[in-house]
Image (cartoon, helix red, strand yellow):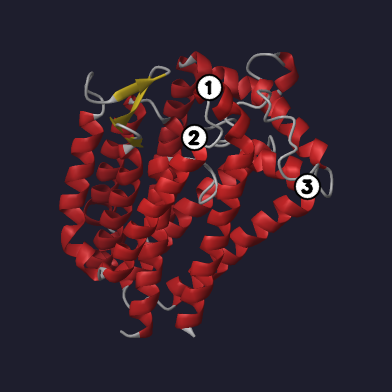
Amino acid sequence: MIRNIRINLFSVTVVLICIGIVMIYSASSIYAWEKYSDGFFFLKRHLSFVFMGAFLTFLAMCYDYRKLKKLSKPILIVSFLLLILVLIPGVGREVAGARRWFRFRVFSFQPSEFANLAVIIYVADFISRKGEQIKAFMHGFMPPLLVLGLTVLLIIIQPDLGTTVALGAVIFIMLYIAGVRWDYLLSVILVSLPILCILILSAPYRRVRILAFLNPWMDPKGGGFQIIQSQVALGSGGVFGVGLGHSMQKLFYLPAAHTDFIFSIIGEELGLFGTIAVIILYMIFITLSLKIIKHAPDRFGYFLALGLLLMITLKAVINIGVSCALLPTKGLPLPFISYGGSSFIFDMISVGILMNIGRTGEYP
């Protein structure tokens, strides 16, 4: 039974990746030709990410996930060091005022993606070790909260508020399911809300995003441009779409068409049926992952799989929500489909770990 679940999970992931390959080429070819004189520029780079991710996924499937328990603290320390190094001028790459990447020739590495995985591994290990002590404030709740707080602080400095909110939500859900008292979690959330408001209001581009979300037509050529063009793309597709490769919004109307707003291009070219098909595939992915979580052989595997699934699911929900103008604009990619090096690769590694947990659950 578990073997069939793993095979089906692998198959769904491959289908999503294949959809991504086709849509990335469709959405980026004209832009790539205009900017780099090579219509296959982004497709070739993405295929290199696919091969790299496939290799690392295979390693994640073969490496016993239970050994990560002993490595959880060293992995966490490495993630802290990388988050600090990326902030150093000349070491981290700065793009549009944000210092979030290491640049290695054709590949950019985003340490916050590694930090997400590191914190999830650490918290899963912490929960598995503490048992009933997780309900205590000082010995159960404070240690993971401090780790999360330090990670969030380093990511906010980059700055990257969306990733911190997503990671915080994942860790809080993990702690709640583990048995941490809800009033502890609620107290931290209530204290964090004013800080979140200050962070949003203190940055002009964040204020613009919130105002554009509330009423994009207040500034249709500025802050509301992306949301409006995304809605035009989805509306233009209708039920059956305008046809693969025939999108008009990708012709320099919709920014980031092959990354943040690739779901909008799917809606325009493949129509309502295409978007529903993608959402159904994610729902199948979630269902299969939940079955793996249910059959996890130990507490560490249970919470590790839960954290990885929550992160992938949350990114998908946020990306689709942004494309449909249900959420404020935030640059989180659509898992397995959007163009994006480190994010795509770590999503694939997460699937490898999920399948590893499923295989171990089959042969405990």
Residues at marks 3 and 2, CA–CA distance in whole angstroms = 26 Å
Note whether 286 is above or below 7 in the view shown.
above
Callout 3: SS:
helix
Which of 40/81 is in front?
40
Left or right: 214, with 54 as reference point: right
Residue at 50 percent across and 77 percent down: it is 5
251 vs 51: above or below: above
Residue located at (73% from left, 15% from top):
218
Looking at the image, how many numbered discs can be counted on the residues? 3
Which residue occupies 25% across, 71% down?
64
Residue 343, quarter of the rendered image: top left
Task: Say left or right for 345 vs 75.
Answer: right
Question: Between residues 102 and 88, which one lies in front from this camera angle?
Answer: 102
User: Where does the image place residue 13, in percent across and percent down from the top left?
Assistant: 52, 61
Q: Which residue is mark 3?
A: 271
Disc on the earlier residue, 1 or 2: 1
Q: Which residue does the numbered mark 2 point to in the structure image?
A: 41
Q: Are marks 1 and 2 in contact (CB under 8 Å)?
A: yes
**Residue type beneath disc 3:** Gly
Q: Amino acid at mark 1?
A: Lys
Numbered tag placed on residue 35 in the rendering: 1
| Mark 1, secondary structure of its residue | helix
